[in-house]
Image: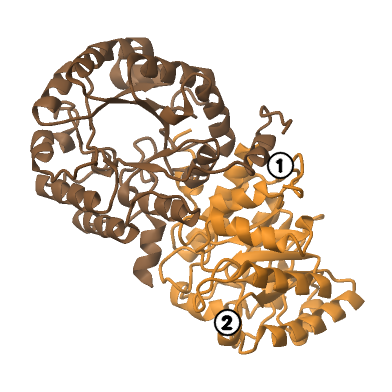
């Protein structure tokens, strides 16, 4: 296990707000029927900043035609109180979105690639190669402005259309994004089908092309596998984990099923393993309670559900 | 590898290179542990049908019922009818709980060919729940062990509160090792280590398993993880990495947590099997037949499954 460090320090926890991909939004509208008011989004982000999270993905500069929930992107970015040493990346699918983001004060952006051709075509209407050309524009422009870019690779452990995805394909896309200039690549198990077995194989492949220190995992909990998958990634030396407070965001391919893993449950595991995150779990639970009340729904976090009742 | 296992962080990384067992035995506790912790009383025929469906799915061990007094556990009042009513598949074990000699005798009379006893790793938990110390509780089982040995009936031992107690909080790994060793020396062929309130994480699991495996061979150990804090699968994974080859779980994640109302308890067998199969580990279980059993009992109980796999598959 050549890349495994002797200690796992400073495991950063990324926070992902509500939903991100434009295509997901169309499905999410079936789930979260109301548009969340701007004030609520801002308050949520402020509470998460107060909890000590080092990175909070604030909003998305996609066209509001596709993602009405994110139509207030500029207002959100301008309205939040930026804590020092906290990053607030935003999604920018193309140059237009990037420029709007910068105009609204963004200091970090993210682009999305897919490891599945079919997924790419069905969701953003272009091939992987074509999407990379779009991202290259964004990344080059971002570089000129010294704005860091994070790259996401979706369907890293399986695709709703293609099924099995070859680890080498994930590695190829990850490598392209990294070489284009993304400082970090988040590998997403978009439909949550991965297990420690497939996670291990995929990471082995990717780690040949991208340094482990530049990798993150974005596990979905649709089949309950997120935490063991994250554990596997940690064992292989990955130090960055994406998660969503209260496990917000369902799975568009299995209506009613869960999607994102909840930050509270991830933190509980990391802290139980003496891994530092700098995050105050109680404050994250509070933020989760707040947003669940606002959305009039129950939390997806088991820790939040159980907390205080057994201890 | 010269790695100190005393640091939790280092434990995690050390385990990454360990080979996993090729086969894992799943002990299905839904019909007993699961139903015992469900509020709705389930008709006898339903219990029998559930067990028969579970047998058909290939599970090698199915905990069928409990020979405790119906006064304490009304859900298990039909213990004799259930034992007599199920269709026993050759090669499949149907253990039952026997808290005392009377229960043991009733169990054997009803046809039981394997039984289980239990001890707690926490003194307070023992006192609050069965009104005696841990040592006194183990003493009470001497009669059962003696009778079981004479009858040639294998006995499984459970240890509760292995990584945390609702009253004492943290539980010393050495205490867990002590109780596990006692049960093993008394003659239990297997010791199931239970995270009763689901507070364990891979960190505390490793510490505890390290201590216990010094006193009881790993081949005689099982883990019984609760998913109250969502940690069960991660905890099971590290247990496998440490060489444990027996995992308890409950179909549809039946059975809540009596210490945290509304919170989940048992880990769902479907989710465990999904993970194990994804790791290339053989279980002998047909996941879709298992899900059928889960769907059946959830319909009957008029409740949603606690299994994420079941929830995901049903919606596609």
- Tell me the number on the disc at residue A68: 2
Chain A colour?
Answer: orange
Tell whether B261 sits left or right of A79: left
From the image, tell me which residue sits under label 1.
A276
Q: Percent position (x, y) of residue B176?
A: 47, 21
Measuring 54% from the left and 69% from the top, which residue is drawn there? A158
Classed neighbour count for the residue bearing mark 1: other residues with Cα under 10 Å, few (<14), some (14–19), many (≥20): some
Judge whether A169 appears above or below A229 on screen. below
Tell whether A222 sits left or right of B153: right
Q: Percent position (x, y) of residue A304?
A: 50, 48
- Please give the chain letter of the residue carrying mark 2: A
Q: Say if residue A206 shows up in the picture.
A: yes
**Residue A132 or residue A262, whichever sits in front:** A132
- Please give the chain letter of the residue carrying mark 1: A
Q: Say if residue B265 shows up in the picture.
A: no
Is disc 2 placed on a helix, strand or loop? helix
Q: Quadrant of residue A71?
A: bottom right
Measuring 47% from the left and 43% from the top, which residue is drawn there? B232
Chain B colour?
Answer: brown
């Amino acid at each position: 296990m050549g890349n495994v460090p002797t200690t796992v320090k400073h495991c950063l926890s990324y926070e992902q707000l509500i939903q991100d991909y434009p295509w997901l939004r169309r499905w999410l509208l079936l789930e979260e029927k109301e548009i969340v008011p701007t004030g609520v989004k801002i308050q949520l982000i402020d509470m998460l900043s107060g909890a000590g999270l080092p990175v909070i993905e604030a909003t998305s500069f996609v066209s509001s035609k596709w993602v009405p929930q994110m139509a207030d992107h500029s207002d959100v970015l301008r309205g939040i109180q930026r804590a020092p040493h906290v990053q607030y990346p935003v999604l920018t699918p193309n140059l237009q979105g990037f420029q709007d983001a910068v105009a609204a004060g963004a200091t970090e952006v993210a682009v999305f690639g897919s490891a599945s051709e079919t997924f790419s075509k069905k969701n953003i209407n272009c091939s992987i190669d074509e999407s990379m050309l779009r991202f290259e524009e964004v990344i080059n422009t971002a570089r000129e402005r010294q704005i860091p870019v994070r790259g996401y690779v979706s369907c890293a452990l399986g695709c709703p259309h293609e099924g099995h995805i070859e680890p080498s394909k994930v590695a190829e896309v990850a490598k392209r994004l990294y070489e284009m200039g993304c400082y970090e690549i988040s590998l997403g198990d978009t439909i949550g089908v991965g297990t420690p077995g497939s996670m291990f194989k995929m990471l082995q492949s990717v780690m040949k092309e991208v340094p482990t220190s530049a990798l993150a995992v974005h596990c979905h909990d649709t089949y309950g596998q997120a935490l063991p998958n994250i554990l596997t990634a940690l064992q292989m030396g990955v130090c960055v984990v994406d998660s969503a407070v209260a496990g917000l965001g369902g799975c568009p391919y299995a209506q009613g099923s869960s999607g994102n893993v909840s930050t509270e449950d991830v933190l509980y595991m990391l802290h139980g393993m003496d891994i530092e995150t700098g995050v105050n779990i109680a404050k994250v639970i509070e933020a989760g309670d707040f947003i669940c009340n606002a959305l009039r729904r129950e939390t997806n976090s088991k820790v939040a559900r159980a907390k205080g009742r057994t201890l | 590898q010269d790695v100190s296992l005393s640091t939790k962080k280092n434990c995690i990384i050390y385990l990454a290179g360990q080979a996993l067992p090729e086969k894992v035995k799943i002990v299905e506790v839904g019909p007993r542990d699961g139903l015992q912790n469900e509020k709705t009383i389930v008709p006898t025929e339903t219990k029998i049908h559930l067990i028969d469906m579970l047998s058909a799915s290939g599970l090698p061990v199915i905990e069928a019922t409990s020979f405790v007094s119906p006064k304490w556990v009304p859900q298990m009042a039909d213990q004799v009818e259930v034992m007599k009513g199920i269709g026993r598949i050759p090669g499949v074990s149907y253990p039952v709980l026997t808290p005392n000699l009377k229960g043991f005798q009733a169990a054997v009379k009803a046809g039981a060919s394997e039984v289980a006893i239990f001890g707690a790793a926490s003194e307070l938990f023992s006192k609050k729940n069965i009104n005696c110390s841990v040592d006194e509780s183990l003493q009470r089982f001497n009669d059962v062990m003696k009778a079981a040995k004479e009858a040639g009936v294998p006995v499984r031992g459970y240890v509760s509160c292995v990584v945390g107690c609702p009253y004492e909080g943290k539980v010393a790994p050495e205490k867990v090792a002590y109780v596990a060793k006692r049960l093993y020396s008394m003659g239990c062929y297997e010791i199931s280590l239970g995270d009763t309130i689901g507070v364990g994480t891979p960190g505390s699991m490793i510490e505890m398993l390290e201590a216990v495996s010094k006193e009881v061979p790993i081949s005689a150990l099982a883990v019984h993880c609760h998913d109250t804090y969502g940690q069960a699968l991660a905890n099971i994974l590290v247990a496998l990495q440490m060489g444990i080859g027996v995992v308890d779980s409950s179909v549809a994640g039946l059975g809540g947590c009596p210490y945290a109302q509304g919170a989940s308890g048992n880990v769902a067998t479907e989710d465990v099997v999904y993970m194990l199969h994804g790791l290339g580990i053989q279980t002998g279980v047909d996941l879709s037949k298992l899900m059928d059993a889960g769907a059946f009992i959830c319909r009957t109980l008029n409740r949603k499954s606690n299994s994420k796999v079941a929830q995901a598959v049903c919606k596609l």
